[in-house]
């Protein structure tokens, strides 16, 4: 991974040093470049000076323009070129949060780095839209080609699709006909995927639209869904709770997990405290309903065949199945069991 050859806070302090006192204070306060490293609102600064928020905005914009036209910024050209080169190395267009987290380890440094993006002439901000997150780029043609490719991929992914990351990367790469070959690496494409507001990645590394099953993860139920999906077979609610902690590092109380599984139609109770996913073909209902579904689809069956088939859907003792086979209201026996 590329590293910066300079300290953002040192550069930003040199850039604001020659501003008029009030302009410098406005910029330092707005971008969190001071001791507190917390940005202030236009209203808060306006109240301090007894001026309107719009006037504060005007002072801020004028100060930024002064910096962009200053000899101080020209002297920092090598440092800004270093930042530009680092962004190009990572793909040339990146989500704002990716740049800030990649090159700054703390909030204070991120504030200074963001300020350099704002005043630096190589860097262009594209605001957040329905399709994409807020992003910075250093090459207009590259940014346009990448966004066009991602829009093509957006159109291809169905609302119910859940894709492995390599599948989605390959989709993007097939759409990058206008992009220089040096950018067509899998790691670069993975970073470009982070630009998308239409597609999301879940904690298991799977991609899909936000509304796709198991993609947007917000609560214990969602984590339980992914745990059961990863396992591929039914699990006791205690096992689900442990899996959530192991896979996602999230504390999951057993009783809470059980309550959440009961409430959600995505989960099917298939035994005493044992749950499976409806999306994996399991259906709810008591054992007699399972037997009725089996006989309806297969026709008359022997006791042994029914026991085997019920065992695929329910974790119950054979005696429980035998008791239900005596239900003459729904079943009849003439050598084999059939629906009445």
Image (cartoon, rainbow, N blue to C red):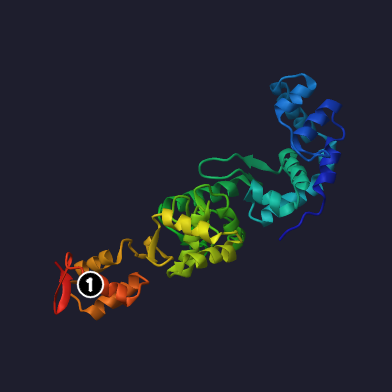
- On the rendered structure, is 17 left or right of 179? right
The answer to whether one can see residue 19 in this image is yes
- Residue 146 image position (x, y, % from top left): 55, 51
Q: Look at the picture and state if 8 lies above or below 307.
A: above
Is 46 or 221 nearer to us in this picture? Answer: 221
- On the rendered structure, is 117 left or right of 152? right
Bin the neighbour count of mark 1 within 10 Å (Cα to Cα): few under 14, some 14-19, many 20 and up. Answer: many
Q: What residue occupies the far left of the structure in this picture? A: 334
Is 189 or 317 nearer to us in this picture? Answer: 317
- Residue 178 image position (x, y, % from top left): 53, 53
Residue ID for mark 1: 325
Q: Which element is circle 1 on?
A: helix
- Residue 153 image position (x, y, % from top left): 47, 53
- Residue 333 image position (x, y, % from top left): 15, 75
Q: Look at the picture and state if 171 lies above or below 18.
A: below
Q: Look at the picture and state if 61 lies above or below 104.
A: above
State the quadrant of the C terminus. Answer: bottom left
Instruction: Give the residue drawn at x 66%, y 41%.
Output: 124
- On the rendered structure, is 110 left or right of 293? right
Q: Quadrant of residue 321?
A: bottom left
State the quadrant of the N terminus. Answer: bottom right
The answer to whether one can see residue 177 in this image is no
Q: Quadrant of residue 68?
A: top right
């Amino acid at each position: 991974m590329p590293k910066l050859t300079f300290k953002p806070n040192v550069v930003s302090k040199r850039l604001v040093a020659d501003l008029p006192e009030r302009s410098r204070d406005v910029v330092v306060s707005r971008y969190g470049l001071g001791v507190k490293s917390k940005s202030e609102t236009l209203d808060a600064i306006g109240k301090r000076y007894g001026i309107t928020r719009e006037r504060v905005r005007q002072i801020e914009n004028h100060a930024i323009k002064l910096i962009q036209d200053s000899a101080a910024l020209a002297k920092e050209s090598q440092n800004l070129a270093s930042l530009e080169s680092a962004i190009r190395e990572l793909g040339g267009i990146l989500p704002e949060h990716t740049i800030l987290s990649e090159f700054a380890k703390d909030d204070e440094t991120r504030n200074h780095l963001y300020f350099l993006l704002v005043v630096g002439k190589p860097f262009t901000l594209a605001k957040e839209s329905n399709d994409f997150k807020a992003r910075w780029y250093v090459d207009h043609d590259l940014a346009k080609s990448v966004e066009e490719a991602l829009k093509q991929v957006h159109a291809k992914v169905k609302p119910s699709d859940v894709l492995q990351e390599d599948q989605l990367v390959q989709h993007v790469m097939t759409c990058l006909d206008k992009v220089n070959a040096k950018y067509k690496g899998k790691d670069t494409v993975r970073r470009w995927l982070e630009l998308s507001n239409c597609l999301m990645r879940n904690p298991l590394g799977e991609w899909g639209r936000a509304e796709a099953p198991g993609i947007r993860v917000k609560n214990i139920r969602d984590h339980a869904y992914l745990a059961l999906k990863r396992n591929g077979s039914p699990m006791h609610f205690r096992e689900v709770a442990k899996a959530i902690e192991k896979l996602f590092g999230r504390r999951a109380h057993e009783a809470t997990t059980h309550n959440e599984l009961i409430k959600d139609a995505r989960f099917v109770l298939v035994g005493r405290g044992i749950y499976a996913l409806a999306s994996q073909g399991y259906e709810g209902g008591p054992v007699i309903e399972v037997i009725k579904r089996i006989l309806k689809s297969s026709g008359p069956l022997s006791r042994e065949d029914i026991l085997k088939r019920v065992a695929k859907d329910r974790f119950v003792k054979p005696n429980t199945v035998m008791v239900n086979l005596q239900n003459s209201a729904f079943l009849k026996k003439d050598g084999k069991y059939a629906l009445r």
